[in-house]
Image: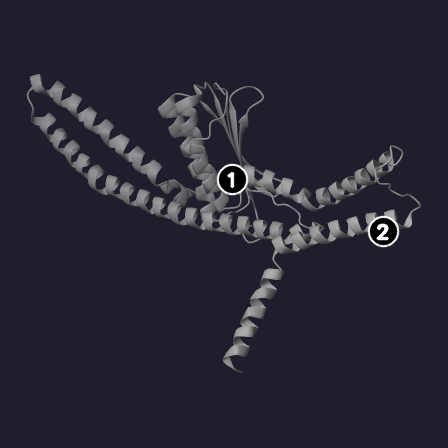
Amino acid sequence: MTAPANRRTMLGARASRLARTPASALFWRIVVMNGLLFTIGLTVLALSPATVSSPVLLTEVPILVIGLALMIMVNAFVLRNSLAPLSALTTLMERVDLVRHSDRIAHNGNGDLTTLIATFNSMLDRLEAERSASTAHTLAAQEAERQRIARELHDEIGQSLTVVLLGLKRAVDRAPDDLREELHTVQETVRASLDEVRQVARRLRPGVLEDLGLLSAMSALASDFSQMSGVPVARVFDPRLPEVSGDVELVIYRIAQEGLTNVARHAHASRVELSLCADNGHVVLRITDDGDGGPIREGAGIRGMRERALLVGADLTVEEAPEGGLRVRLAVPVTKERA
């Protein structure tokens, strides 16, 4: 095939692609429908016994007005039906949030806008998949960094403080009576610091989750929260939870940890209920407090919980509890692969 023939083939293929675009299809549809409408109106006017004088008589004005009104109404009806999906598409664009599960627009029977709506839905699917993948990498890196810091706290600082405690014990045993009380005070301060370091390391890396399982880790988390905040936690745990993967367990634990942290910082609650149970094919986590409640402001903490929930296909809701305070609910679907 010669070069001019190749060029003609490429131009023909390009023209064919341009002719099939949604914008061009919608344009030609409107042009054809308007042309057909005006042709019908002209044909009816030509074949009907009605005539138009020059100048126009008053008796002919109502006929012309009615004909024009009918043409405008039919044209408006056709355009409204053709462009109606754009309103739903605009509404969806305004409320799309990649941190939440977004709904989609059904594109069956939408004429020339079918391709546009299908493309937009596909774009949302792609963006959500990319956001989920990038969030997974970020959270995995975050968990790895937490484990590294926890190991360093436990192995380096923890061991150093333990050595200091042993040295203080020997010094207390040999110290004169007038210095022994002061050394005891220093010893207790170092011991308290060592306990705090261990608690921080445990929060950074929930070893009990790996060693004893999700329910034991949640129970330990509730105990630590009550010890730190002084707020009692009512625990409702289902011992017959379906088996889930390690990633799901970590997501549930981290969301419960963040939810209790938010209660300690902002709620001013006097009581918290922590629930973990199976419900209709889901593992459901609930954190309910009787605190201040009020308007829900989604800061970094709640958005972080939503990002974690997306990783395992879970649904997270944060709402005001009927009895006051807030309720955090996480529903994780239990698939056959996880069961």
Where 236 sits versus 180, above or below? Answer: below
**Residue 322 coordinates in the image, percent (x, y):** 58, 21
Say whether marks 2 and 1 touch (CB < 8 Å). no
The image quadrant where one finds the N terminus is bottom right
Left or right of 300? Residue 198 is left
Q: Amino acid at mark 1?
A: Asp
> Which of the two discs, 2 and 1, sits closer to the camera?
2
Q: Of 11 and 308, which appears nearest the observer? A: 11
In the depicted structure, whether residue 194 falls above or below residue 8 = above
Callout 2 crowding tier (Cα within 10 Å): few <14, some 14–19, many ≥20 = few
Residue 67 lies, in percent from the top left, at 83, 40
Question: Observer-nearest residue: 30 or 330?
Answer: 30
What residue does disc 1 label?
97
Q: Disc 2 marks which amino acid? A: Thr
Q: Earlier in the sequence, mark 2 or mark 1?
A: 2
Q: Is residue 115 above or below residue 302?
A: below
**Helix or strand or loop: what does disc 2 sit on?**
helix
What residue is drawn where x is 38% and y is 46%? Answer: 138
On screen, residue 255 versus residue 71, left or right, reads left
* Quarter of the view holding residue 222: top left
Q: Which mark is residue 43?
A: 2
Q: Nearer the viewer, residue 153 or 77?
A: 77
